[in-house]
């Protein structure tokens, strides 16, 4: 891909931006690799539909297959300025940075050893992903699974125990073997639909 045409006005504008600064604009185009935003302030881009650009991971804390699940052309958005892309001459933005990280909120409300109820979302060679709250998925590794992996399928309801909460990497480790000892048998595990556990996703 050839380097976009550069204008002095565009460079001056981009160099004036500071990391963390909020920038507003209108979604100008949605592509498979991200979203172009026509910013309210600053010049037009000589090649692209907008000077602002948001990659799919920066659109939302949730896992999505395409940008169209989050925004639509013509929608007004405000994103945090991340960096000046000197090759494409564009301002990289983040919508999710404008909102609290839901995984950290979730991590504040759970503890290692806590029992949760969830739904199997995906089977992978190294284990099973289970959704334990709205947008929150944890991994049950093969060694922490009761019986062969084939005994569960996507959509199955399972009970799991939290074995690790990695805030830095935003990862939740679960087990189907280590149910908390001494837990009253008549107290049901929290479910995926429990209001106080409604938060965001886990990256894997």
Image (cartoon, helix red, strand yellow):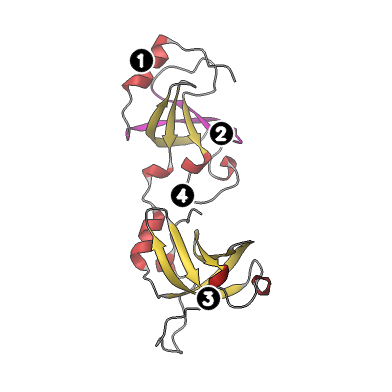
Q: Which residue is mark 4?
A: 61
Q: Mark 2 or mark 1: which is in front? A: 1
Task: Give the CA separation, mark 4 to mark 3.
Answer: 26 Å
Residue that numbered label 3 is attached to? 176
Q: Where does label 1 land, which residue?
A: 12
Q: Which is nearer the eye, 92 or 147?
A: 147
Q: Quadrant of residue 105?
A: bottom left
Q: Mark 3 or 1 closer to N-term?
A: 1
Q: Residues within 10 Å of mark 1 (few under 14, many from 20)?
A: few
Residue 26, placed above or below residue 152: above
Could you tell me if the residues under marks 4 and 3 are in contact, i.e. CB atoms within 8 Å? no
Q: Which picture quadrant has residue 93?
A: top left
90 in the magenta segment:
no
* Horizontal and vertical percent position of residue 192: 50, 69
Q: CA distance from mark 1 to mark 4?
A: 32 Å
Category of crowding for the residue at label 2, using alpha-carbon neighbours closer than 10 angstroms: few (below 14), some (14–19), many (at least 20): some
Q: Where are the magenta residues, as a range?
A: 20-41
Q: CA distance from mark 3 to mark 1?
A: 56 Å
Q: Nearer the viewer, residue 17 or 160?
A: 160
Q: Position of residue 85 (x, y in %)?
A: 44, 25
Whether residue 27 appears in magenta in the rendering, the answer is yes
Task: Find the distance from the CA under tag 3 to the CA under tag 2.
Answer: 44 Å
* x and y percentages locating residue 20 in the rendered image: 32, 35
Picture residue at 44% right of the left edge, 31% below the top? 92
Q: Residues within 10 Å of mark 3 (few under 14, many from 20)?
A: many
Q: Is residue 68 visible?
A: yes
Sequence-first disc among 3 and 2: 2
Q: Is residue 193 visible?
A: no
Task: Kindly check if marks 4 and 2 are in contact, taking CB atoms under 8 A apart as contact.
Answer: no
Dominant secondary structure of the residues highlighted in magenta in the image: strand
């Amino acid at each position: 891909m050839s380097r976009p045409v550069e204008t002095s006005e565009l460079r001056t504008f981009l160099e004036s931006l500071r990391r963390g600064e909020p920038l507003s604009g209108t979604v100008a185009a949605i592509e498979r690799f991200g979203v172009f935003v026509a910013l309210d302030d600053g010049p037009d881009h000589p090649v692209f539909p907008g000077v602002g650009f948001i990659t799919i991971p920066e659109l939302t804390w949730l896992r999505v297959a395409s940008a169209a699940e989050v925004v639509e052309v013509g929608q007004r958005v405000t994103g945090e300025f991340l960096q000046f892309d000197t090759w494409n001459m564009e301002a990289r933005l983040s919508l999710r940075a404008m909102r609290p990280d839901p995984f950290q909120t979730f991590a504040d409300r759970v503890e290692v050893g806590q029992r949760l109820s969830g739904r199997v979302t995906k089977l992978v060679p190294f284990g099973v992903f289970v959704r334990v709250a709205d947008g929150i998925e944890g991994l049950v590794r093969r060694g922490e699974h009761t019986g062969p992996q084939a005994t569960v399928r996507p959509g199955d309801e399972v009970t799991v125990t939290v074995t690790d909460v990695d805030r830095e990497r935003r990862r939740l480790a679960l087990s189907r073997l280590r149910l908390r000892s001494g837990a009253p048998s008549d107290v049901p595990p929290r479910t995926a639909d429990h209001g106080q556990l409604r938060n965001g996703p886990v990256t894997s």
